[in-house]
Amino acid sequence: MNNFISIPVKEVGPIKIIGDLFNEEVIVPLATYEKPLWPSVNRGAKISFKTQGIRVSLIDDKMTRSVILQSEDAGYLSKTKNELLNRKNELKAIVKSTSNYARFIDLHFQIIGNLFYIRFEFQTGDASGHNMTTKASDQLIKWIIKEYPQLDYVSISGNICTDKKVSAINGILGRGKNIIAEITIPEEICIKFLKTTPKKITELNIKKNLIGSILAGSIRSANAHYANILLAMYLALGQDAANIVEGSQGITYASVNEDKSLYFSVTCPNIIVGTIGNGKDYDFVESYLKKMDCLDDSEYGFNSRKLAGIIAATILCSELSLLASQTNQGELMRAHQLLERN
Amino acid sequence: MNNFISIPVKEVGPIKIIGDLFNEEVIVPLATYEKPLWPSVNRGAKISFKTQGIRVSLIDDKMTRSVILQSEDAGYLSKTKNELLNRKNELKAIVKSTSNYARFIDLHFQIIGNLFYIRFEFQTGDASGHNMTTKASDQLIKWIIKEYPQLDYVSISGNICTDKKVSAINGILGRGKNIIAEITIPEEICIKFLKTTPKKITELNIKKNLIGSILAGSIRSANAHYANILLAMYLALGQDAANIVEGSQGITYASVNEDKSLYFSVTCPNIIVGTIGNGKDYDFVESYLKKMDCLDDSEYGFNSRKLAGIIAATILCSELSLLASQTNQGELMRAHQLLERN
Amino acid sequence: MNNFISIPVKEVGPIKIIGDLFNEEVIVPLATYEKPLWPSVNRGAKISFKTQGIRVSLIDDKMTRSVILQSEDAGYLSKTKNELLNRKNELKAIVKSTSNYARFIDLHFQIIGNLFYIRFEFQTGDASGHNMTTKASDQLIKWIIKEYPQLDYVSISGNICTDKKVSAINGILGRGKNIIAEITIPEEICIKFLKTTPKKITELNIKKNLIGSILAGSIRSANAHYANILLAMYLALGQDAANIVEGSQGITYASVNEDKSLYFSVTCPNIIVGTIGNGKDYDFVESYLKKMDCLDDSEYGFNSRKLAGIIAATILCSELSLLASQTNQGELMRAHQLLERN
Amino acid sequence: MNNFISIPVKEVGPIKIIGDLFNEEVIVPLATYEKPLWPSVNRGAKISFKTQGIRVSLIDDKMTRSVILQSEDAGYLSKTKNELLNRKNELKAIVKSTSNYARFIDLHFQIIGNLFYIRFEFQTGDASGHNMTTKASDQLIKWIIKEYPQLDYVSISGNICTDKKVSAINGILGRGKNIIAEITIPEEICIKFLKTTPKKITELNIKKNLIGSILAGSIRSANAHYANILLAMYLALGQDAANIVEGSQGITYASVNEDKSLYFSVTCPNIIVGTIGNGKDYDFVESYLKKMDCLDDSEYGFNSRKLAGIIAATILCSELSLLASQTNQGELMRAHQLLERN
């Protein structure tokens, strides 16, 4: 019947973003059925203008794909691993031949009995790189099996990639853009606009995000709701939104500075986005990306890194606002009821 | 500017579903930018008609919310915990007074030093229950603090709920609908329509989904891509799609039967859906829900349980199809390239 | 050749312990090759006398064993689960018939496809209960298979017990004694005897034990070195010391009080000890247990609970001392070098 | 009072070990209060002689220590990280100056907000390397802080080492010796001496060790009881036995070969042992190490690698025997009762 469904979207901001990557005031689109998200992000966005801004830093950028091979015994795999580590230039050349965009970076091994798990790392420029890395990996294992005929094919995906699934490996070895967004908020701004104190937010972060997540049996994750923002922005921007699963595994860290101001940060190790490729040719996607200056004629990968930076800054706005409201008993409930009435 | 974004949607199926909950042939809507998902689910759906069907079983159904309180020392919390466990009827009455739908089931405690984490469990009928449980919890902690004045409020959400975040607690204690979908596929059907064998699928599941996920440092999760289907159906059906994070933590289990047929199952412990409430009043949502007979005048909670069952069956179709294709070297790449050309 | 190996042991303390369980000054034996552990615990023990003492609270006490059964499909398992939940009295009677000590408490289920995992919970009095619960479980599954003939035996141990292995389930559902030890240390005592401040210890705990453990991909664990103390005491006291694996999964929580004193706590959810049973009939074990008044003619289970309380208090001493030393650059290295020279 | 406690010890074996590292028949000492361990290992040891032997392979060997530093913002840390990655030769030289044994291999970073976690990797020859790496790290951070004065000291141990605690990082990045032990057992040998079949063991491993551990919320761990063997051997051999915590996180993998024989393997990524250093100068330790030819005048690190290989082979014996017994209902209970009567 339908060819499309419609999801409510709203542009929110601007958000004041600073840092080594770029300095801009950005308006961001959030597509979601959960409309209270909009005013929540907006509250954080307004705070960004009462401070020096939200500092965004890029820590890492790569895309990964893992495969499984198998042999007779672990001894052969151990030798093969060591040889492959010395043949990276050949692997690099193979990848280059499969794509104009994908670049081989490195590889990582896990050996379990006679099973051989290889995790390839690539740069994929402005594309998120899902297909590009599958294609490259397909060629890489063809070549490896040819060079090491005692190896047998098991799978083109070995679950240590790890795509759209919970893992510790993505945070430890990297997958997608690893971005940190930080803000320093004077105490009086905190009190006036967030109705709370730096100390209260810091304490709540310890008890809820850090200890609460540990108690929940979470893994490498300590935040209130990164997934909400990731979903809303991934949808509005033509991204593969199932990647919010790994994206949800980030860490919020807050502390009170000597001058009583609040240091507040969100660390997002696995933001997976592109500004080209599948999903980017819808008019609304193009128009949003253009408006955020993420379709410029920039150096390899810059547009998608910038986009990831904007997303991390938006996550900060939303995380800050939610935590602030939860420090006050009853506030969250009142806010939701108020929004529902409107 | 825009008020809505548009996401491609397609109805796929029918899928033949059997079991104690309901027996029907169902067509399902999948909204996604990743169009290869559609033929993949369709392949699984076709298989369901070559067998007795996909058996769907409901294991559990509840919604949760956790809060944090604090006291002077752990001794007081230990006593309070034991008292509250004996006052469940009072808690039940409070919840009843906050909502016509929410019903208190039980509560679970975690004590860390002088911090008091309480996880409330509710039935929420046909609503997913996010807001209903927040409202109920808001009243519950008001009452608890009144009864135990040595307790102080810390947070209305303690991260052991766990909402939209990775956890082990959701799988262990339950959150949302816990559904298992199973199918038995004769060997010749497997060979003819999936181009693989029961043994190959079983072996791949062990090496990729079980061991691969363990190696990835995953937590209570062993599957190929439940998140893809959850996202596509949650979006088409007006659900809060950020709940794919916990939904992604499910387990695929396959084995070869004595008669060489394939036993294949997906266990989805945390499907969080409703057929009423926020997001359900869009025309397309209503029309999809109606078509799947999920808006009937049924007993408390049946519609949403049925919906969860349909989603689990769809996950099975998609998981089966992807695993089958990954057993053959190069097939996944060829399939993607073929679809891209069209 | 040898019939015994010798491990260095030293009695350390006394430690001043208070709380609802017991109030005593206790000397504890630590058997270890790592002798710097002795002065480290002693420093903490001395601090306990500069304060009101270390408050010990018991949160929970149980022993568990899990089994695996299997059926044709999940639907049968779901029904069987619900029936068994209504037949707890029969299960209780079976357990009673297998042992004078073991008492059935409850059971927990996990269903994956057609696999049926049951986790039984028992009280085991003053015994740690490893064998007692295996024996009881052996009888329980015999009876269950007789009552539900469609169930087949898979394993007497299903790894969700979880014995001597890492898990989230032990912390969430309980295994062994769950004990919290807490202390409040005036700022000046902290500065004088620990050469650090409440703020520094609190900050270190956040950055090292909470965030560091999250980054490590740990699961339900946030401490510096509980395993060291558990090992040393389990060995000296005839316990099954491989249980330090689950014991190591505890959480240290510290904060600065309004009066600038330090609140410091260790939460040890899985201390597995007995005062009777295997390993307790060695002369040195008996003599240590006697000296700690853990062989008294007390009520069912009191002696082993007290023992667990003493262990938690000792863990606190050692954790506090190590964290204090790590707040100062170079101190740990100097301390080790000093001890090595002596 | 006492200066030593006594733990029962027995030499078990011989075990037939083959592979690239060494080929020998080895007798191993097991110190434990749990005496059923001895016949269990012996059963596996006997099997090793009915086959080609237990193949042992070394996958990796390193020791680690992590530290925490801090700065004003993440941007500075990102730059510093990139600079340090280009100054590895300077770091190497510093480590060389602190020790005759320790060699710097590499370093790994985690940045969370303005917190800077560095994990150093070292070779430590025949020592387990706990102290050596602390000493080296102490010098490394002194130098780093001098070179980058905007960095402040937080902790000499950052919990991502990870020492004596559960983690995913140790398995992913490596800590200690990563050893795989494998055996191929003809079907008739399996039936005759283990009273079970290759298929039964393979199935049990899937349901108990793989799926059971996933359900338990374990992390990078899937085995029955590696911790028991690690403890017994670490104690008998003067090792720091609290390292069984990370050692317990290994993976058992079994499958049925085309010729119906059993492929059985144990992968032990984190065996932490030395043949020199603290705990090695007790007479019994020296005599055991000598008997296993682990005190020879070999190349740097060979003795300790060999020792780790012997331990992994012993783990295989014990894991195989336990799993075999659990495939038969009632066998484990009968075996324990029989042993208790003797």
Image: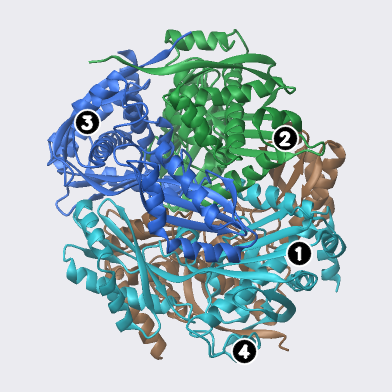
Chain colours: A green, B blue, C cyan, D brown
Q: What element carries label 1?
A: helix
**What chain does badge 3 belong to?**
B
The residue carrying mark 3 is: B295
- Specify the quadrant that holds the C terminus of chain A: top left
Q: Which amino acid does label 4 sit on?
A: Lys
Which label was assigned to residue C290? 4
Q: Which amino acid does label 3 sit on?
A: Leu
The residue carrying mark 2 is: A263
Q: What element carries label 4?
A: helix
Q: What residue type is labelled 2?
A: Tyr
The answer for how far apart the CA atoms under marks 3 and 4 are is 68 Å
Q: Which of marks 2 and 3 is in front?
A: 3
Nearest the viewer among A263 and C225 is A263
- Confirm or deny contact between disc 2 and disc 3 (CB under 8 A): no
- Specify the quadrant that holds the N terminus of chain A: top left
Nearest the viewer among C72 and D125 is C72
Determine the residue positioned at 45% across, 14% down: A280
| Mark 2 Cα-neighbour bin, 10 Å: few <14, some 14–19, many ≥20 | many
